[in-house]
């Protein structure tokens, strides 16, 4: 049943890909194939259902914000983290600067770029990126996870807007220490290569409240996972999060590399890859796959099961 529905979801999504375009503001991302589409469902039993470009490696981009938030909560604790970053959705684009000056230098939430840069300053470790990489391998159950050096250098070169935000927040005392090293950690984390299958596994761990269902190992405390999934609902698809919550209703996080990770509590993880993006930076194909699956498998978080 899952395989059939997934195939149908991919067929449905394919017909919308032409409406999107690959990201170009990070030059290396513009090399992606706009016609690519893959999706994977991971179940607690260890079964996987895949269609299309399920094993293609692409960079996590904003999906890394989930992993870095957990690491910051683990190493700096709840109070410190939320003294530096808020909990409110913005309704603004993910790379918007405007509220930092007009509202508060404390970023509205950890899922926008400004918030994630602060979060990278709150991973209290001498090796924040290496920790993040190891943690991502575990969460995605994928030893092949690695830094994509080309995307990283491309991001670093093109990251003027992120740099501007970091230095502004430093001038306001929100970021303390070495802004360049936090930016470097952030750029690297965004440039970690994953697959749709790996994202499905990550979604599954979140669906299972932080425990890898195959090994029984707890990878994150359940209260942290609850926070992460709440942000996925309220801020996971940038300034499309409201519409996505109404139409799909599955806690999800997108990235401009074309990935979306989704978590259906107690049931499954879903990973999608389709690098053609809509105007707000969300994967056109991924959103359509999820819309189809939500309707046909009754996955909306408020659906009666
Ligand atoms: N690395 C990207 C950036 O900083 C991440 C943004 C995203 O995926 N939305 O702009």
Image (spheres, rainbow, N blue to C red):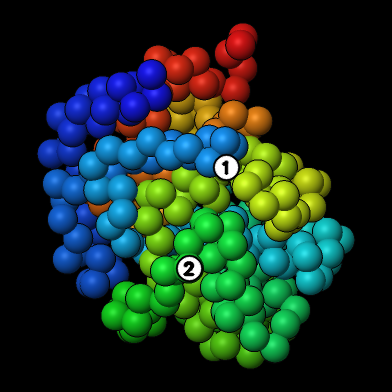
Q: Which of marks 2 and 1 is nearer the N terminus?
A: 2
Neighbor class of circle 2 (other Cα within 10 Å; few <14, some 14-19, many 20+) is: few
**Who is closer to the viewer here, 63 or 105?**
63
Residue 67, how many percent across, how many down?
A: 60, 61
SS for dot 2: loop
Q: In this view, does 242 lie above or below 101?
A: above
Mark 2 → mark 1, Cα distance in angstroms: 17 Å
In this figure, which residue is indicated by the disc labeled 1? 204
Q: In this view, does 281 lie above or below 248?
A: below
Residue at 37% from the left image edge and 56% from the top image edge: 195
Residue at 50% from the left image edge and 71% from the top image edge: 189
The tally of labels here is 2
Q: Is residue 214 above or below residue 51?
A: below
Which of the 4 quarters of the picture holds residue 85?
Answer: bottom right
Q: In this orientation, does residue 126 appear?
A: yes
**Who is closer to the viewer here, 79 or 199?**
199
Q: Is residue 141 left or right of residue 3?
A: right
In this figure, which residue is indicated by the disc labeled 2? 143
Neighbor class of circle 1 (other Cα within 10 Å; few <14, some 14-19, many 20+) is: many
In the rendered image, the residue lying farthest to the right is: 79
Q: Which of marks 2 and 1 is in front?
A: 2
Q: Is residue 199 left or right of residue 27?
A: right
* Picture disc at residue 103: none
Which of the 4 quarters of the picture holds residue 11?
Answer: top left
Q: In this view, does 149 lie to the left or right of 236?
A: left
Residue at 70% from the left image edge and 88% from the top image edge: 126
Residue 50, how many percent across, how many down?
A: 33, 39
Residue 3, how many percent across, how many down?
A: 34, 27
Residue at 53% from the left image edge and 41% from the top image edge: 46
């Amino acid at each position: 049943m899952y395989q059939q529905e997934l195939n149908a979801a991919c067929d449905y999504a394919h017909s919308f890909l032409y409406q999107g375009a690959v990201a170009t503001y990070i030059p290396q991302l513009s090399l992606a194939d706009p016609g690519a589409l893959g999706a994977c469902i991971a179940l607690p039993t260890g079964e996987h259902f895949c269609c299309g470009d399920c094993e293609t490696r692409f960079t996590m981009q904003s999906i890394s914000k989930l992993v870095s938030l957990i690491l910051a909560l683990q190493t700096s604790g709840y109070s410190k983290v939320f003294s530096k970053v808020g909990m409110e959705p913005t309704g603004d684009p993910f790379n918007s600067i405007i509220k930092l000056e007009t509202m508060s230098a404390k970023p509205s939430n950890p899922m926008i770029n400004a918030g994630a840069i602060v979060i990278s300053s709150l991973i209290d470790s001498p090796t924040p990126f290496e920790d993040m990489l190891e943690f991502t391998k575990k969460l995605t159950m994928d030893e092949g996870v690695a830094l994509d050096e080309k995307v990283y250098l491309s991001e670093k070169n093109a990251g003027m807007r992120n740099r501007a935000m970091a230095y502004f927040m430093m001038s306001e005392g929100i970021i303390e220490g070495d802004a360049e090293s936090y930016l470097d950690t952030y750029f690297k984390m965004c440039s970690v290569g994953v697959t749709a299958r790996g994202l499905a596994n990550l979604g599954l761990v979140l669906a299972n409240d932080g425990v890898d269902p195959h090994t029984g190992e707890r990878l994150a405390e359940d209260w942290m996972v609850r926070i992460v999934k709440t942000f996925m609902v309220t801020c996971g698809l940038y300034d499309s999060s409201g519409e996505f919550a109404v139409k799909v209703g599955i806690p999800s996080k997108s990235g401009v590399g074309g990935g979306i990770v989704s978590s259906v509590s107690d049931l499954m993880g879903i990973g999608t890859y389709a690098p053609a993006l809509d105007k707000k930076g969300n994967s056109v194909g991924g959103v359509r796959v999820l819309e189809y699956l939500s309707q046909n498998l009754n996955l909306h978080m408020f659906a009666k099961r």
